[in-house]
Image (tube, helix red, strand yellow):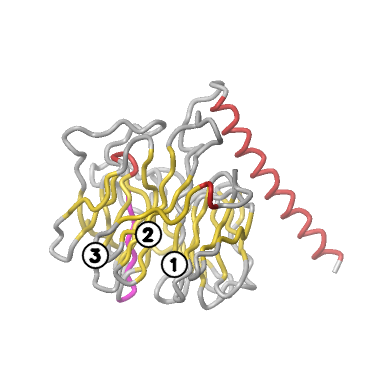
Amino acid sequence: MKLNAKHQKRASGRKRLRTNCFRLVLTLVAMGLMSVSATAHPGAGIAVDRAGQIFFIDTGSGLWRIDTTGKFTHLSRTLFHWLALDEDNRFANTQLPSGARGEIVKVGSNPTVLLSSDYPIAIGGDGNLYYPSGAAGNLRLMRMTAAGATSVVIAFPTTVNGKPLPYIGGIIAGAEGSLYYTEDTAIRKIDAAGRVSTVVTVRAPASPPSIPATSEHPYLRGLARNHRGFMYVADTGDARVLKLASSHDLTTILQTQSPWSPTAVAVFGDDVYVLEFLHTVRDVRRDWSPRVRKIASNGQSSLIATLDQMPGAR
């Protein structure tokens, strides 16, 4: 019992330290004492569970849930960037990765929400947890079982431009044991045998928008795939959400007005949910203001969550 309490105390201390460091970075950026980089960027975590409840990350206040009645609940003040839903609670008792390159923590149950500090994560169709590990040129995809065993799935190949892959922007499970991930300009697929192929390469628009703290065009982050096989991806650098049909035709289903830009998407049936952030650290209210948008199956778009609706987030 003493060892367990000591371990919990150390883990709590690490979490507080990471949170305080992240807040310090945002403060320094706002004061003009530090430039914006990948270290300080808004979260890219949104998901919908089987019941239709929406979970999303606000970089400034933590994890939120919107239930099917529209009620907001603040689930955690952990200021991490990505999430995955463990709807079968397979990892409820698993010791999750924690180290110099990032940390994954658990919040709640039914479903258990996994929050990741520094890299995107996904629960695969096999029920295992997948996440990247390593540095540019040596980035690997890891698999973790519910028993805590880890193994290397693949070494990520170079980007579609032939350069070392420094990071991935998002990762999701696909059909038949496959996974999909984003690099800045492409969506790529890893099949069950570990083969990597390019699903689509995305071009920047002719006149790309100017998004504060973002210079890549395109800059693909979170992605989602619905029951029809349609894929959706947030192009943060160009302030748009793209839909990829089964014919591999790309269409823009959302174009936000700078400095607002999407970072992640989720699907529930034929509806699409988009996590957007105000991409400026000079907002008069706070850093990285969030909002959540619903694009219904009929194409109607509406904001269903804003900072004013999130009690205690301001």
Toward the right, the furthest residue is 2
Q: Nearer the viewer, mark 1 or mark 3?
A: 3
Picture coordinates of residue 257, whole percent (x, y): 32, 38
Mark 2 element type: strand
* Quadrant in which the C terminus appears: top right
Please report the bounds of the magenta region as a residue range. Answer: 176-183
Disc number placed over residue 48 in the picture, else none: 1
Residue drawn at point x = 47 percent, y = 40 percent: 41
- Mark 3 is on which residue type? Asn
- Dot 3, crowdedness within 10 Å: few (<14), some or many (≥20)? few
Q: Is most of the magenta stretch helix, strand or loop? A: strand
Picture coordinates of residue 87, whole percent (x, y): 51, 74
Q: Is residue 179 magenta?
A: yes
Picture coordinates of residue 137, whole percent (x, y): 38, 44
Disc number placed over residue 298 in the picture, else none: 3
- In terms of sequence position, does the residue under pointer 1 or pointer 3 come before the other? 1
Residue bearing mark 2: 273
